[in-house]
Image (cartoon, grey):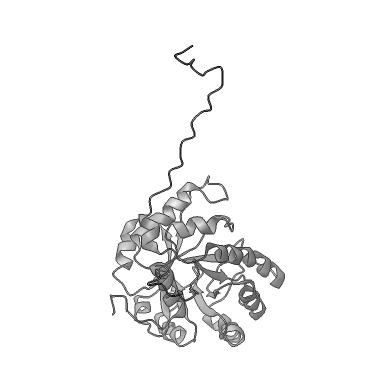
Amino acid sequence: MPTNEQETFKSKLIERLRQISRGAPAPIGFGRAPEVMTPALLLVAVIPRNEPQLAEAALKAGADSVALRICGANTDLLHETGDLAAEETAIREIQKVVGDQAIVGLIIGSNGTVAPSELRKLDRLGVDYLAAYPHLISATFLELSDVGRLAVLDQQSGSLARGINDLSLQSAFVRINRPSDSPTFMTIADVAGNRAAADAIHRPIIAFPSWDLAPDDLEVLRDAGIEGVALVGPKPDADVDAVEQYIRPFRDVVKKLGKPAGRRAALTEAPPILPRVAPRVSDEDEEPDEDE
């Protein structure tokens, strides 16, 4: 069973995440630097249902990858999905429609398990990557060779992260646990949790937000050392227009962010210190000149 991350990858998603993690190269010499096409963040659309029209809508709105699901639970954002036998036809149809235009992956949810004997079938399904919860998937997942291998983590402690660093998992979706009384918007604790995950997990990270993600959050996540963001939903019964309207503002923000900063730069950059504004001195408070 392999225990070390491989240097070469068959997964386009993993390679693009690694490019973002390294950051944009600095130009050398006086010649014109080539245009850098690597975005500041990768956008992964986790569409509400495994339907070709929704996958096309996500791609049209600017998603870099479309994540399909099996064993997916019904949530406020996503419709329930069945096991591989129930979803295989839809998955293959989506690959035919958008497979040449976008990176298509598959998330194995928590509403069921995949038998070790089915993993080889998933490996040959033709998707670019597979993502699974480590406590629900067989260890033979680490032996899959034709797909990118991602973990889905609920970030709780550093012990699991340290173990993953020694395994052949190549990336991770990370969801930060939040106190029950947290507001719906991103908080300081969410930022700190993502930054801690980026510091502990030595693999590219895709944030799986546990709050109501807003387009303005992307710059904060980029500066916390995150390489990608999962755009989930927006709701189980969302149609094509709803999916496009949800994703497009995030793509617009990514374009404005420009080149990737790189994780090392993000984690070592000192927080900005705003200059202290001196209080204005009124005429009455001014001291008289010595001549007076």
Quarter-wise, where is residue 64 in the image?
bottom right
Q: Residue furthest front?
A: 291
- Residue 79 visible from this viewpoint: yes
* Residue under the point 46% across and 52% down: 191
Residue at x 57% of width, y 70% of height: 45
Q: Residue visible at 46% across and 80% down?
A: 12
On-image quarter of the N terminus? bottom left
When asked about the image quadrant of residue 56, the answer is bottom right
Horizontal and vertical percent position of residue 174? 44, 62
Q: Describe residue 225's horizontal placement relative to residue 95 as left or right.
A: left
Mark yes or no: residue 156 visible.
no
Residue 51 is situated, as x and y percent measured from the top left of the image, at 64, 78
Total number of numbered discs in the rendering = 0
Residue 146 horizontal/vertical position (percent): 41, 85
Q: Nearer the viewer, residue 272 or 48?
A: 272
Seen in the picture, residue 159 relative to 172 is either above or below; the reply is above
Front in this rendered view, residue 10 or 54: 10
Going by the image, does 135 lie left or right of 105? left
Residue 72 placement (x, y as % from top left): 54, 70
Q: Is residue 158 above or below residue 15?
A: above
In the image as oriented, which residue stretches furthest toward the top?
A: 292
